[in-house]
């Protein structure tokens, strides 16, 4: 402001000097030359003064502007390297419930969407001829038991006959020893033969009894088989689940579900949905980090919710075509919110760092950007804004990197500001105006 007033005063003085010169020249022609010299000198001095004043005023106006630079603060936080894989929910187990025996559906108790428990009846089949089989089996058992009773009586009879024959032979033999010649040897031999025959009859009776008893067991097993097959007329749930499809109605003819049958219709389809499976293809590079029991985060875009999952099993073999390993994740679904067939994103944590200094990935320049993904321990450079708003280029050691943040092992302290975005025009020591951006948080 002072320079501006001084310039105005000099300009006014210049105008007055020019007017005075013209007036003197008109009054005395002899002094014309002297006045011209004085006027020229005065005008020259004023011109120099005005030039200096103009330059002094224009100097600050033409000073270069300070650049505004986007910066972010180095913060301490937890980092994790997640691998996101897409998969489809499948029931933990799903089967078509078949009938073991052929028959008509007498009653069916479930329909699509019903929840059933373990061993809960699903349907009853009617097999009329099976009642006759049970009656015949029962009669066979009773007949075998009667044969056992008769064999016991025969054994007792043979045992009694053997006892008498053996007693007779013993008496005659003792008499012949005490009084030789009193009893003929022929008579002793006949009695001895009868004793041996009676003993053989006892052995035969015992064998007949054993055979009759074995027959009882055979007939009992046959009856048990018929009863077991009759139990199959009641179809029950092999596990707790949800009926997802029904194939038969009351009165339908159901064939026996044997391995050789190719056109057998099941009764219902049962799915265990209280726990679901996700089969994800884990890339070869991430295979060493996968282990049974590992916790994973499962996000379902359709429901806009996250669920806890667990690595339950994996094939332990790479698919040679895709270079991936099939890994199964179990997800609890007690309230049946998740439905088989839904897509899910499995966030598999490959590495994790707790309480480390991080900065945005856009703030780091890596020496060899064509070397692929950044690895742990890789070096880089960042542009730091010092406390006096000057640019400083600093080397840093990098650690774990995510999609937005990267760990800095050394070279930066918490709270320091780093330049994000393009840094090609910045020079060390250059003064800038930092502007904190929202990229300060991940």
Image (cartoon, grey):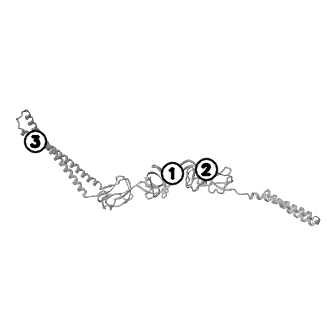
Task: Give left or right: position of 285 versus 199.
Answer: right
Front-most of 328 and 375? 375
Residue 39 at x, y = what percent?
88, 62
| SS under mark 3 | helix
Task: Give left or right: position of 295 versus 220.
Answer: right
Q: Alpha carbon of mark 1 to alpha carbon of mark 2: how far? A: 24 Å
Q: Mark 1 against mark 3, which lies toward the viewer?
A: 3
What residue is disc 2 on?
396
Residue 368 at x, y = what percent?
59, 55
The reply to whether callout 1 and callout 3 are in contact (CB within 8 Å) is: no
The reply to whether callout 3 and callout 2 are in contact (CB within 8 Å) is: no
- Residue visible at 10% across and 38% down? 169
Badge 2, how many Cα within 10 Å: few under 14, some, many 20+? many
Q: Earlier in the sequence, mark 1 or mark 3?
A: 3
What residue is disc 3 on?
193
- Residue visible at 72% across and 57% down? 64
Task: Give left or right: position of 14 versus 73.
Answer: right
- Residue visible at 24% across and 54% down? 134
């Amino acid at each position: 402001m002072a320079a501006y007033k001084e310039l105005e005063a000099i300009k006014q003085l210049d105008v007055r000097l020019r007017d005075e010169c013209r007036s003197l020249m008109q009054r005395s022609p002899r002094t014309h030359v002297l006045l011209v010299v004085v006027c020229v000198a005065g005008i020259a001095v004023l011109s120099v003064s005005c030039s200096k004043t103009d330059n002094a005023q224009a100097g600050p106006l033409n000073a270069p502007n300070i650049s505004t630079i986007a910066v972010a603060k180095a913060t301490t936080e937890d980092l994790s390297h997640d691998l996101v894989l897409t998969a489809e929910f499948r029931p933990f187990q799903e089967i078509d419930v078949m009938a073991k025996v052929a028959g008509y559906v007498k009653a069916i108790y479930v329909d699509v969407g019903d929840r059933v428990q373990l061993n809960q009846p699903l349907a009853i089949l009617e097999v009329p001829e099976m009642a006759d089989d049970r009656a015949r089996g029962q009669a066979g058992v009773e007949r075998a038991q009667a044969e056992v009773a008769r064999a016991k009586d025969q054994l007792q009879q043979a045992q009694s006959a053997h006892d008498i024959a053996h007693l007779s032979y013993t008496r005659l033999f003792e008499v012949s020893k005490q009084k030789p010649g009193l009893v003929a040897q022929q008579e002793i031999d006949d009695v001895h033969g009868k004793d041996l025959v009676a003993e053989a009859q006892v052995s035969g009776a015992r064998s007949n009894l054993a055979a009759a008893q074995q027959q009882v067991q055979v007939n009992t097993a046959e009856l048990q088989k018929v009863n077991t097959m009759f139990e199959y007329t009641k179809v029950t749930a092999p596990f707790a689940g949800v009926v997802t499809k029904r194939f038969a109605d009351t009165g339908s003819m159901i064939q026996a579900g044997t391995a050789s049958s190719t056109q057998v219709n099941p009764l219902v389809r049962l799915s265990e949905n209280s726990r679901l499976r996700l089969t994800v293809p884990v890339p070869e590079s991430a295979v060493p980090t996968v282990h049974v029991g590992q916790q994973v985060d499962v996000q379902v875009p359709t429901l806009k919710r996250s669920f806890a999952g667990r690595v339950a099993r994996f094939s332990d073999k790479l698919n040679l075509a895709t270079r991936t390993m099939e890994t199964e994740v179990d997800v609890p679904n007690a309230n049946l919110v998740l439905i088989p067939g839904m897509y899910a994103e499995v966030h598999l944590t490959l590495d994790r760092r707790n309480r480390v200094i991080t900065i945005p990935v856009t703030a780091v320049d890596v020496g060899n950007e064509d070397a692929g993904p950044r690895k742990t321990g890789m070096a880089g450079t960042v542009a730091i804004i010092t406390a006096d708003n000057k640019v400083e280029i600093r080397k840093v050691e990098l650690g774990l990197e995510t999609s937005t943040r990267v760990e800095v092992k050394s070279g930066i302290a918490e709270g320091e500001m780093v330049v994000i975005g393009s840094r090609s025009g910045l020079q060390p020591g250059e003064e800038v105006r930092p502007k904190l951006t929202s990229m300060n948080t991940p």
